[in-house]
Amino acid sequence: MSVGPRILIVNVNWIGDVLFSTPSIRALRRKFPDAYLACWVPPRCKDLLSNNPHLDEVIVASDDTSFFNWPGSLATAIRLRGKKFDTAIFFHRSKTKAWVARLAGIRERIGFRSGPSGGLLTKAVPPPSGRPHRTDYFLALLEGVGVPAQGRAPEFVPRPGIEAEYAAVLNAGGVDPAAPYAVVHPGGNWDLKRWPAESFVRWIRLFRARFPWKIVVIGTPPEEPLAAGIASAFPEGVVSLCGKTSLDTLALLLKGSRFLLSNDSGPIHLAASQGTPILALFGPTSASETGPLSGAAVRVLRKDVGCEVPCYFRSCDHRVCMELLTPEEVFAESERLALETR
């Protein structure tokens, strides 16, 4: 059997974006079934791809590509040179990472024509017009070099052998996997994307009056005070597992839930990869660019308040795009979703 090409994917730096790249990883594997396919990600994204069935290797290296980290960049280049890659495909448009690939002796370097890495590419693909969904943006790069898409749904595969760990998570929250439950994520990587905590509390009251299901609040360790504050408003039926799940156990928790209610954040894309119905709350970001893609039911709620979207402001005097979403509106949509999935 002939030896296939050795391809390095230089991936992006955030959980949602890495999940958006998985359809492109799948497309590359279908196009090059005999290739050695590796992916370079920062440490925080390693677990997203560790069990991806289409990759032969996940290479973890710092995403600090500043001039001041030139020793780290040089060390990465030496490390990559030893792996003898033929081709690097840049989902991340980084001039420093393109230099690293060149220093590593990777002869073919493919990326979009625009951006800081453009002059270091050997094959520059015209970027897509308009503001496509991030998944379609990555797929457009591959289509520009003759790799057809193989669907748009994201993929995440939990590591094998985690049944005992998952059972311990459920036990800690008093969650019966045979009984219906819904998952809520009130956090987000910046405050303007977050629906107010009191709105989540009001929604839970409305929802549990109609559906006496367990409500499981999730999030990262820094979001624990937020999750605990919401859960503490209820004497029973609401539990916080914030900071208590790994990526793998969270995926299983989402897979078993009736639906996820969440702000625009990583868990909605993890839920999409597990076929979980999703009710997503959007404000300053654009669902057409970064919304969940899934074969399961997806509902997106947002208020048009006349602002340009996405705005990506880090602070705002008004916050009306999220605050005008009422718990009653969200409950009405979640009731429809719950009845569909019951």
Image: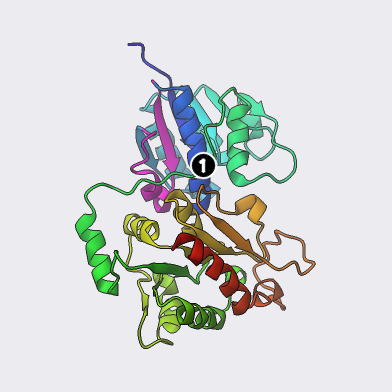
Measured along the vertical axis of the image, is residue 80 above or below residue 267?
above
Total marks shown come to 1
The answer to whether residue 114 is visible is yes
Q: Nearer the viewer, residue 56 or 296?
A: 296
* Circle 1 residues within 10 Å: few <14, some 14–19, many ≥20: many
Q: Is residue 105 visible?
A: no
Residue identifier under label 1: 21
Q: Which residues are magenta?
A: 34-55
- Quadrant of res 124: top right
Please name the residue shown 52% across and 49% down the image.
294
Colouring used for the render: rainbow
Residue 50 covered by magenta stretch: yes
Q: In percent of the image, x 48 and y 48: which residue is there?
A: 63
In the image, residue 88 lies in the stretch drawn in magenta? no
Check the picture and name the quadrant holding the N terminus: top left
Residue 128 position by quadrant: top right
Q: Position of residue 120 (x, y in %)?
A: 61, 30
Residue situated in front as seen by the camera: 260 or 267: 260
Residue placed farthest to the left in the image? Answer: 164
Q: Which residue is at 43% across, 20% downward?
A: 5
Instruction: Name the spot of residue 123 as percent of width and height, x first.
Output: 62, 24
Please state which amino acid type lies under the numbered disc 1: Ser
The image position of residue 315, as x and y in percent, is 66, 72
